[in-house]
Image: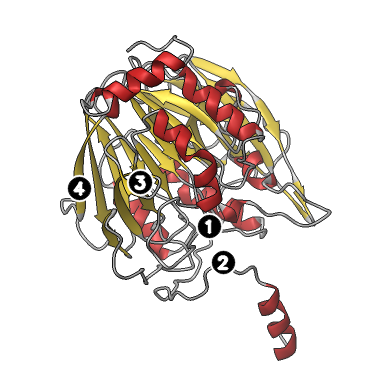
């Protein structure tokens, strides 16, 4: 490419708000090729949808393949089947394959199901979440598709878990649509075996003025989450329940001010939580509200100002975010101060994308920041019972037996110091909550 042209494209590249940070050297993208017949499924992944149901999603190059999943509890013996829907999309000169989404169930908890997509191709299997505690969530943000991503995924897979939660930035396709397909193939060995529940990051936006003004075309087509089931009208924010936990996925890149649909939906969703059924409330979003890394400073601030009070009054237990390519754990916080009744804030954007790590931090360390480190890794939230959960962070450089950071959490619903405020809050709410 002529030098002048190169500089022109370099100038056009989207810039982050904070440019005064240095990242660890990036590793190149790993393109995962398609090596199955055109009618066979590729990019298979599963997600939770309602109680005891699972959505199976996959892509075929061939258009005639039916959107049908056969499944059963024994390998090769499929005594049930379900038919779903399909879609496809265009982005400039790219046309996607046939994208299938089939909801199967009702399914038994803590059970391995074997399944086949579209009547041909390899058999896959997944395990449903348990019906009772304990339940273990894996958290990994900003995955991308590099050698570092592979290391993170291998690390995640090395120990059992129930559900993967991803706080945004999946493929880093950044409008290069074949990279969405490559990402789907890269994660298939993992995402076809456990439900992956995701929310969007800035790399999912893919907005092009006038032509694709709303963006998220690939993301919404390929990774539909159970938003309708939680009363949301957008795939960019939704919630779901699983084993004593109400998980809320917020959209950092959807409107969030007081007049927005997301704000109204969140207020309604929080008011409906039954803390007897789901004592734990966990929120995921992409751009962190609390962050002492020099990367992306202040990018989550307007969303924090708009929504933090709602989460605080509802006694949300933990807020996970991504975006910053590092790990950071804060104490319980409300309005920039330590508060025993506020959520614990954790940044877990260290999944392994092509941009590398965010190495530089604000000094001195803010008192509300308890642990921060720029290393690739993943986190695990193991909810033991109604009152206690354990959070741990593992570096990819260590063995899984080494917990780089770990802490026990007490649910705010059962916290003595916060209970009176909760009672107060519940008196002012619809009165449906049992406390
Ligand atoms: Fe991001």
Task: Give the Cα distance between marks 3 and 1.
Answer: 15 Å
Q: Residue furthest right?
A: 210
Q: Are marks 3 and 1 in contact (CB under 8 Å)?
A: no
Q: Are marks 1 and 2 in contact (CB under 8 Å)?
A: yes
Task: Choose the circle earlier in sequence order: 4 or 3.
Answer: 3
- Identified at 61% across, 69% down, the residue is 15
Q: Within 10 Å of the Cα at label 3, are there few (<14), some (14-19), or many (20+) other Cα atoms?
A: many
Q: Quadrant of residue 342?
A: top left
Q: Is residue 137 left or right of residue 285?
A: left
- Identified at 78% across, 51% down, the residue is 212
Q: Are marks 2 and 3 in contact (CB under 8 Å)?
A: no
Using the image, tell me which numbered label, if any, was put on residue 17. Answer: 2
In this rendering, the answer to whether 106 lies above or below 191 is: above
Q: Is residue 206 left or right of residue 183?
A: right
Using the image, tell me which numbered label, if any, was put on residue 345. Answer: 3
Q: Residue 223, percent across and down?
A: 58, 39
Q: Within 10 Å of the Cα at label 1, are there few (<14), some (14-19), or many (20+) other Cα atoms?
A: many
Q: Residue 76, percent across and down?
A: 43, 25
Q: Name the mark nearer the viewer: 4 or 2.
A: 2
Task: Choose the circle earlier in sequence order: 3 or 1.
Answer: 1
Using the image, tell me which numbered label, if any, was put on residue 299. Answer: 1
Using the image, tell me which numbered label, if any, was put on residue 406. Answer: 4
Q: Is mark 3 within 8 Å of ligand 1?
A: no
């Amino acid at each position: 490419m002529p030098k002048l042209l190169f500089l022109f494209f370099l100038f056009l590249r989207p810039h982050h708000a904070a440019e005064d940070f240095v990242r660890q050297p990036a590793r190149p993208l790993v393109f995962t090729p398609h090596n199955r017949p055109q009618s066979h499924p590729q990019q298979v992944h599963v997600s939770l949808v309602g109680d005891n149901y699972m959505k199976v999603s996959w892509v075929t190059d061939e258009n005639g393949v039916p959107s049908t999943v056969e499944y059963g509890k024994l390998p090769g013996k499929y005594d049930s089947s379900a038919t779903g829907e399909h879609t496809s999309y265009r982005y400039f000169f790219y046309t996607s394959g046939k994208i299938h989404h089939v909801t199967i169930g009702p399914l038994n908890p803590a059970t391995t199901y074997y399944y086949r997509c579209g009547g041909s191709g390899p058999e896959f299997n997944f395990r449903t979440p348990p019906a009772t505690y304990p339940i273990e969530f894996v958290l990994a943000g900003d995955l991308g598709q590099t050698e570092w991503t592979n290391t993170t995924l291998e690390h995640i897979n090395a120990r059992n878990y129930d559900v993967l939660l991803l706080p945004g930035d999946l493929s880093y396709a950044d409008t290069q649509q074949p990279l969405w397909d490559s990402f789907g193939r890269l994660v298939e060995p993992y995402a076809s075996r456990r439900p992956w529940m995701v929310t969007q990051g800035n790399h999912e936006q893919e907005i092009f003025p006038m032509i694709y003004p709303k963006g998220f075309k690939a993301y919404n087509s390929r990774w539909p989450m159970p938003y309708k089931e939680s009363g949301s009208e957008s795939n960019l924010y939704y919630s779901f329940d699983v084993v004593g936990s109400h998980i809320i996925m917020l959209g950092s890149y959807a409107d969030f001010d007081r007049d927005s649909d997301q704000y109204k939906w969140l207020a309604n969703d929080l008011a409906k939580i039954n803390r007897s059924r789901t004592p734990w409330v966990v929120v995921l979003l992409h751009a962190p509200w609390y962050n002492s890394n020099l990367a992306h400073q202040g990018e989550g601030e307007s969303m924090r100002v708009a929504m933090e009070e709602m989460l605080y009054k509802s006694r949300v237990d933990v807020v996970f975010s991504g975006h910053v390519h590092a790990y950071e754990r804060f104490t319980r916080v409300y309005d920039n101060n330590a508060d025993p009744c506020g959520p614990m804030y954790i940044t877990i954007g260290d999944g392994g994308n092509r941009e590398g790590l965010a190495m530089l931090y604000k000094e001195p360390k803010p008192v509300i920041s308890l642990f921060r480190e720029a290393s690739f890794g993943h986190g695990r939230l193991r909810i033991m019972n109604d009152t206690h959960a354990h959070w741990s962070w593992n570096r990819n450089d260590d063995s899984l037996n080494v917990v780089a950071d770990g802490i026990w959490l007490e649910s705010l619903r059962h916290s003595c110091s916060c209970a009176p405020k909760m009672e107060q809050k519940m008196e002012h709410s619809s009165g449906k909550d049992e406390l």
